[in-house]
């Protein structure tokens, strides 16, 4: 079993990963899941199961919004004392209008914003990774980065119709 698979399962069991392992895992998620996203049928990608439920496109848009919010946490948390950063996910998806995005552009945006998270986390010192950010609770940047990957995998497995990944 490769190191990513070990880290993947460690992440899902809630085992603590180092920041380096979390970054490697995110890089592997991008590499593994982008091609799968590109294979999703356009009609299936846009289909809304119910009027008040997200389509697969909107769910991917939610992951982009989550990435943006976490970028803010990862950056602001390094220079402010316990910044409080939350967002209204339904409003962000609605205002982002992901349902009308070009499929390729949306997938590329998802991949690029996650690559940017890798750059930010690589530039985060060990000391800064221990700084605290407030979401609903208080968490270190390092914990938030690992939790971000779990959240990402949960949604990617859902929208790709893969085996469910429990979250939180």
Image (spheres, helix red, strand yellow):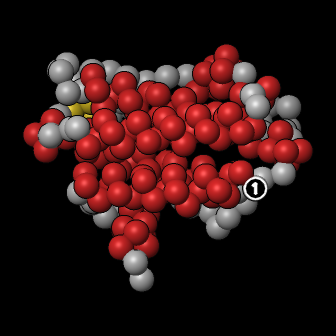
Residue plotted at (35% across, 73% down): 3
Residue plotted at (40% across, 78% down): 2
Q: Is residue 13 placed above or below 168 in the rendered structure?
A: below
Q: Closest to the observer: 96 or 131?
A: 96
Q: How many labels, in total?
A: 1
Q: Is residue 13 placed above or below 100 in the rendered structure?
A: below
Looking at the picture, how far across and down is residue 39, in whole percent? 75, 56
Residue plotted at (58% across, 34% down): 109
Q: Is residue 147 left or right of residue 99?
A: left
Asked which quadrant contains residue 72, the reply is top left
Residue plotted at (26% across, 43% down): 122
Q: Closest to the observer: 130 or 100?
A: 100
Assign the N terminus to one quadrant of the image: bottom left
Q: Is residue 72 visible?
A: yes
Looking at the picture, how far across and down is residue 12, in whole percent? 43, 63
Looking at the picture, how far across and down is residue 80, in whole percent? 19, 19
Furthest residue in direction left, as rendered: 127
Looking at the picture, how far across and down is residue 159, in whole percent? 70, 51
Asked which quadrant contains residue 163, the reply is bottom right
Furthest residue in direction bottom, as rendered: 1
Give the residue number, with chain letter if any, for mark 1: 39
Q: Is residue 140 visible?
A: no
Q: Closest to the observer: 85 or 6?
A: 6
Q: Is residue 163 left or right of residue 138?
A: right
Q: Closest to the observer: 94 or 134?
A: 94
Q: Is residue 146 left or right of residue 111?
A: left
The crowd level at tag 1 (other Cα within 10 Å; few <14, some 14-19, many 20+) is: few
In what element is the residue under mark 1? loop
């Amino acid at each position: 079993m490769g190191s990513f698979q070990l880290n993947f399962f460690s992440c899902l069991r809630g085992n603590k990963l180092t920041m380096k392992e979390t970054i490697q895992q995110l890089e592997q998620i991008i590499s593994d899941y982008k091609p799968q996203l590109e294979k999703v049928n356009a009609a299936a990608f846009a289909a809304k199961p119910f009027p008040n439920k997200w389509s697969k496109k909107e769910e991917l848009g939610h992951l982009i919004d989550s990435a943006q919010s976490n970028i803010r946490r990862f950056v602001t948390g390094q220079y402010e004392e316990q910044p409080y950063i939350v967002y209204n996910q339904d409003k962000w998806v609605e205002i982002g209008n992901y349902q009308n995005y070009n499929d390729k552009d949306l997938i590329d945006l998802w991949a690029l914003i996650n690559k940017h998270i890798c750059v930010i986390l690589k530039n985060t010192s060990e000391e800064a990774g221990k700084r605290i950010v407030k979401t609903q609770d208080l968490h270190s940047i390092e914990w938030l980065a690992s939790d971000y990957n779990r959240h990402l995998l949960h949604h990617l497995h859902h929208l790709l119709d893969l085996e469910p990944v429990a979250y939180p």
